[in-house]
Amino acid sequence: MAVPKQTVSTGPLFDLGDRIAPCGTHSATCINVRDLFNTERKKFQSEEIETVDVTGFLFGFRTSDGQAHRVATRAFKISGSQKSGLFNFLKSWLGQAPKFGWDHRTMKGRKALIVVAHQPGRTRPGQMFAVIASISPQPARHDELPAQTPARAPVPAHTPRPTQSAPVASSHVASAPSVEDAGDDPLAF
């Protein structure tokens, strides 16, 4: 006689509490990676039940007012397929495709730029949830940059140039400005 099993939901892997993370782009740190093995769930676009291993990532960040927030990814099926959600998520985060055999749990403690969006729940449409809409590697020196863009220096008043009596022909061809020419520009790249 077959014994029916209780289907385990692969809903949220982390308890985030009642506070929802604010929308926007944030510099975040991966504070936890959680794997669940032999989890039963419905197959994609099917009523059939499958047993899979899933993983999820929990990120933490502080807003400009100093409040701490947490946001988690959805549960990803642990798969090395280039079509899998986990592979594409890690590829976006790393800036390159992860190598086979590499342990995704080493991402704990790594920083990223995440875009947080609000989305209604699938099972509870009236309730909003914070989701990670996109992720990218954190640029070098990102933490050292000022939080706000500095104001541009005031432009000095225009002083008229002395007039010339006649234009002088020159064989010099004007060239495009180069990176070295940007020394006086306060917003130079």
Image (cartoon, rainbow, N blue to C red):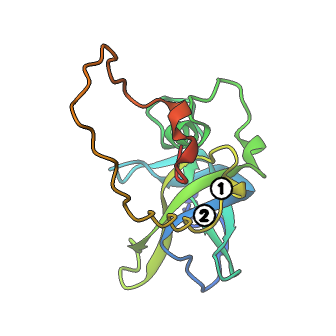
For image coordinates 52% across by 77% down, the residue present is: 22
Q: Is residue 18 above or below residue 72?
A: below
Residue 15 in percent (x, y) is at 67, 74
Q: Secondary structure at mark 1?
A: strand
Amino acid identity at mark 1 = Phe
The reply to whether residue 74 is visible in this rendering is no
User: Where is residue 17, by image quadrant?
Assistant: bottom right
Give the distance between the C-alpha atoms of the residues marked 2 and 1, in whole angstroms.
6 Å
Q: Nearer the viewer, residue 172 or 160?
A: 160
User: Where is residue 171, by image quadrant?
Assistant: top left
Amino acid identity at mark 2 = Ala
For image coordinates 65% across by 71% down, the residue present is: 70
The reply to whether residue 186 is visible in this rendering is yes
N-terminal-most mark, 2 or 1: 1
Q: Nearer the viewer, residue 90 or 65?
A: 65
Q: Secondary structure at mark 2?
A: strand
Residue 161 in percent (x, y) is at 34, 49
Q: Residue 37 vs residue 158: left or right?
A: right
For image coordinates 52% across by 40% down, the residue present is: 182
Task: State the count of labels.
Answer: 2
For image coordinates 68% across by 43% down, the residue present is: 140
Q: Are marks 2 and 1 in contact (CB under 8 Å)?
A: yes
Residue at the far front in the pictured view: 165
Mark 1 closeness class: few <14, some 14–19, many ≥20 residues within 10 Å: many
Q: Which residue is mark 1?
A: 57
Residue 14 in percent (x, y) is at 67, 68
Q: Nearer the viewer, residue 130 or 39?
A: 130
Which dot marks residue 72? Answer: 2
Q: Is residue 80 above or below residue 130?
A: above
